[in-house]
């Protein structure tokens, strides 16, 4: 008599991962090839006989462990962390097969050649299915990596160009709002203190940002080359005492400002934790 089995656990858990869904769905879809559902087998006296769930053991020995070891090996070359997902898949599927809600019966447990063949076919089918999925996944990841690389490269180039453009500028903060002529006069006096009477004249001086009540806008001073701007920044402490309330700094991009803000936040947190011997180190210009 042909061995007949009932696939276990109709209430199996489904992972959100498409691969596992496809695999589990495939197992269920080919369920009829393993036979029809049987009534509880009985002996000659009419007593119910529950045989060892041999089919589950066969599937576990010859299918699940070897297959998921193979998947884990393949996964390590595709995605970081994919192996841990496969561990979860293995655990859930093995749990579903080893603790079924419906016992697997064999009317002739001593004869299992056909069953082994069928489970071998299932294993091969699953292997081919997963191989196809992995190939498709690798192709998609390759395309995504190329897109990300292009986007990252463009961002880096754009940021570099913006920093080069801003390297000609100097920002002066906390100068009270006044007319453009007054701003030009204040900037000229600061530059005279810092670089002497023969300092390079700036190309232009202007306020930046929107007007706000009780707040003065920053003054941007632009020179013809970055050397002039760096000279002002290196010697800014030479400005007279009448300019001590002003802040002179470089013209930073939004990304630079964001990074510096995070550094200040980290510095504050670490100092509150007792690290009082640390500070933010600025690169020499």
Image (cartoon, grey):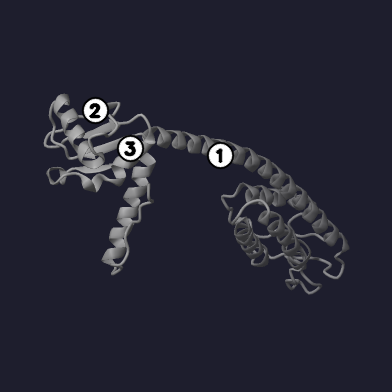
Name the image quarter holding the N terminus: bottom right
Of labels 1 and 3, the one closer to you = 3
Q: Residue furthest front?
A: 198
Left or right? Give the position of 49 relative to 115: left
**Considering only vertical position in the picture, is 49 above or below 77?**
below
Of labels 3 and 2, the one closer to you = 3
Q: Quadrant of residue 119?
A: bottom right
Residue at position x 27%, y 26% from top? 204
Q: Nearer the viewer, residue 150 or 201?
A: 201
Expressed as whole percent of the image width and height from the top left, the position of residue 189 reads: 18, 35
- In terms of secondary structure, where does tag 3 sit? helix
Counting residues from the N terminus, which is met first, the one under dot 1 or under dot 3? 1
Expressed as whole percent of the image width and height from the top left, the position of residue 264 reads: 30, 54
Counting residues from the N terminus, which is met first, the one under dot 2 or under dot 1? 1
- Residue position for label 1: 148
Q: Is residue 217 visible?
A: no
Estimate how packed mark 1 is, as few (under 14), some (14 to 19) or many (20 or more) residues with alpha carbons within 10 Å: few
Labelled disc at residue 229: 3
Measure the alpha-carbon separation of dots 2 and 1. Answer: 38 Å
Expressed as whole percent of the image width and height from the top left, the position of residue 18 reads: 62, 47
Residue at position x 73%, y 71% from top? 50
Measure the alpha-carbon separation of dots 1 and 3. Answer: 35 Å
Q: Is residue 43 visible?
A: yes
- In terms of secondary structure, where does tag 1 sit? helix
Of labels 2 and 1, the one closer to you = 2
- Residue position for label 2: 206
Q: Nearer the viewer, residue 146 or 104?
A: 146
**Considering only vertical position in the picture, is 170 above or below 54?**
above
């Amino acid at each position: 008599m042909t061995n007949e089995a009932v696939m276990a656990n109709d209430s199996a858990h489904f992972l959100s991962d498409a691969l596992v869904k496809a695999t589990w769905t495939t197992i269920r879809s080919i369920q009829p090839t393993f036979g029809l559902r049987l009534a509880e087998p009985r002996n000659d006296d009419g007593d119910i006989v529950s045989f060892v769930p041999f089919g589950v053991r066969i599937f576990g020995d010859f299918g699940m462990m070897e297959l998921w070891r193979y998947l884990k090996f393949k996964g390590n070359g595709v995605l970081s962390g994919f192996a841990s997902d496969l561990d979860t898949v293995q655990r859930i599927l093995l749990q579903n097969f080893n603790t079924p809600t419906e016992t697997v019966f064999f009317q002739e447990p001593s004869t299992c050649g056909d069953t082994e063949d069928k489970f071998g076919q299932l294993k091969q089918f699953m292997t081919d299915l997963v191989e196809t999925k992995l190939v498709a996944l690798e192709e998609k990841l390759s395309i995504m990596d190329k897109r990300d690389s292009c986007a990252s490269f463009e961002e880096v180039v754009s940021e570099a160009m913006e920093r080069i453009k801003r390297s000609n500028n100097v920002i002066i903060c906390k100068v009270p709002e006044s007319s453009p002529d007054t701003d030009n006069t204040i900037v000229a006096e600061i530059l005279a203190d810092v670089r002497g009477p023969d300092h390079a004249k700036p190309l232009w001086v202007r306020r930046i940002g929107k007007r706000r009540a009780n707040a003065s806008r920053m003054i941007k001073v632009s020179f013809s080359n970055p050397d002039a701007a760096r000279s002002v920044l290196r010697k800014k402490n030479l400005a007279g005492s009448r300019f001590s309330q002003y802040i002179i700094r470089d013209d930073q991009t939004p990304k630079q400002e964001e990074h510096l803000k995070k550094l200040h936040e980290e510095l504050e947190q670490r100092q509150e934790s007792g690290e009082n011997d640390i500070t933010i180190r600025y690169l020499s210009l």
